[in-house]
Image (tube, grey):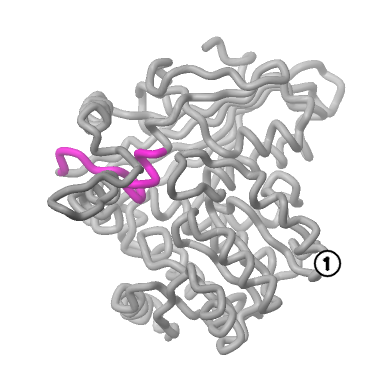
Amino acid sequence: MGKTLVVGAGGVSHAAVHKMAMNSDIFTEITLASRTKSKCDAIARSVKERTGVEIATAELDAYDVAATVALIRQTGAEILVNLALPYQDLVLMDACLEAGCHYLDTANYEPEDVAKFEYHWQWAYQDKFKEAGLTAILGSGFDPGVTSVFATWLKKHKLETIRLIDVLDANGGSNDQEFATNFNPEINLREVLADARHWENGEWKVTPAMTHKVEFDFPGIGPKNMYLMYHEELESLSTHFPEIERARFWMTFGDAYIMHAKVLQNVGMTRIDPVVHDGHEIIPIQFLKTLLPDPGDLGAETKGKACIGDIVTGQAKDGSGEKTYYIYNICDHEECYREVGSQAVSYTTGVPAMIGAAQVLKGNWVEPGVWNMEQLDPDDFMDMLNTQGLPWQVHELDGPVSF
């Protein structure tokens, strides 16, 4: 059905490409490209062993627009799936516009030198993609991504309006590491240590990072401490569902993670500005990344489950008054590893990236322009979650959350 170019060869890419190969009726030809071709080759070998599908690999500097354009044209790719770093979103969108290729990513753009991730840089491409007759899908991971589709599905089938939304992300997995992040350490720490922001009554409320803690009993996991923090879907949800009074994002962290993160911040290891060491400029957080475990290598030793979902309150479609629903997925780290060789955090991002790309290739999401997930029809995406390893549940609660 479609030729696909995947850029990036980390843990998310590992999961996504395996799942694409398992859906070869949709992804008829797959090329995996990265600055380090050996990483692409390793994924290609695993794909061949697990699925029997051959994928092509290529070396690519994602910052080189001309090289990306050339590779798109060489492969005949209909869609570029950006699983590289969010710093590269804009240059890859530029390449897609020049080469005439659809675009999809899992995280919004942020500059390397400012820990500030917002959608306005990518939303500014709306007219360019419309005029080119091309589709750009932003944030097709789990959060952002599935959590936004969950909200849209509820609004299409259960609720007339959304008044309150809380996105809850719990990783109940454990491994043998003293300190390790669940995804790219540089991006993870930049997110976690940023000020917490949430949307309430038409404005952003700001609180210091890691200061607002609530215990919540997660399905399949049990009680965990979750912390209020900022995540990009809050911006897009509050924009596209303007009736929302309050939108918040919560993520679980253990005490050891919080302690390590604060110490690293206090000693300057999470700084993103250059410092001079032994006569050479280094960026501390990038140096730290080289010291920490690669999340893509933790699948074999990670056990436990992840649970991610939305608690949404709004007026019911049937006129029965205000209703609250909890919609979520439970994902098992060990089951993910058995299927594709990835832990659940990579799996829960990689599988939605595959499903989002499939929506474009199947012709469901091909409206020219730049779109966030909540702006798109949710039904086939939700069906594919159930058949592709991320089954979801929805339950009505007694009322809005009390925290």
Residue positioned most to the front: 279
Choose top left, top right, bottom left or bottom right for residue 199.
Answer: top right
In the displayed structure, 91 sits above or below 308; it is below
Determine which residue is flagged by label 1: 131
* Image position, residue 101 (x, y; %): 67, 74
Q: Amino acid at mark 1?
A: Glu
In the displayed structure, 313 sits above or below 402; it is below
As drawn, is 27 to the left or to the right of 180?
A: right
As drawn, is 289 to the left or to the right of 344?
A: left
Quadrant assignment for the N terminus:
bottom right
Please name the residue shown 42% across and 55% down the image. Answer: 347
* Image position, residue 398 (x, y; %): 62, 14
- Between 382 and 134, the residue placed more toward the observer is 134
Can I make out residue 126 in this image? yes
* Image position, residue 195 (x, y; %): 46, 25
Q: Residues within 10 Å of mark 1 (few under 14, many from 20)?
A: few
Residue positioned most to the bottom: 74
Q: Is residue 180 magenta?
A: yes
In the displayed structure, 53 sits above or below 387; it is below
* Image position, residue 369 (x, y; %): 77, 59
Choose top left, top right, bottom left or bottom right for residue 272.
Answer: top left
Please name the residue shown 83% across and 28% down the image. Answer: 317
Please name the residue shown 27% across and 31% down the image. Answer: 265
> What stretch of residues is rendered in magenta?
177-190
Residue positioned most to the right: 319
- Mark 1 secondary-structure assignment: helix
Please name the residue shown 55% across and 31% down the image. Answer: 167
For the image shown, how many numbered marks are present on the structure?
A: 1
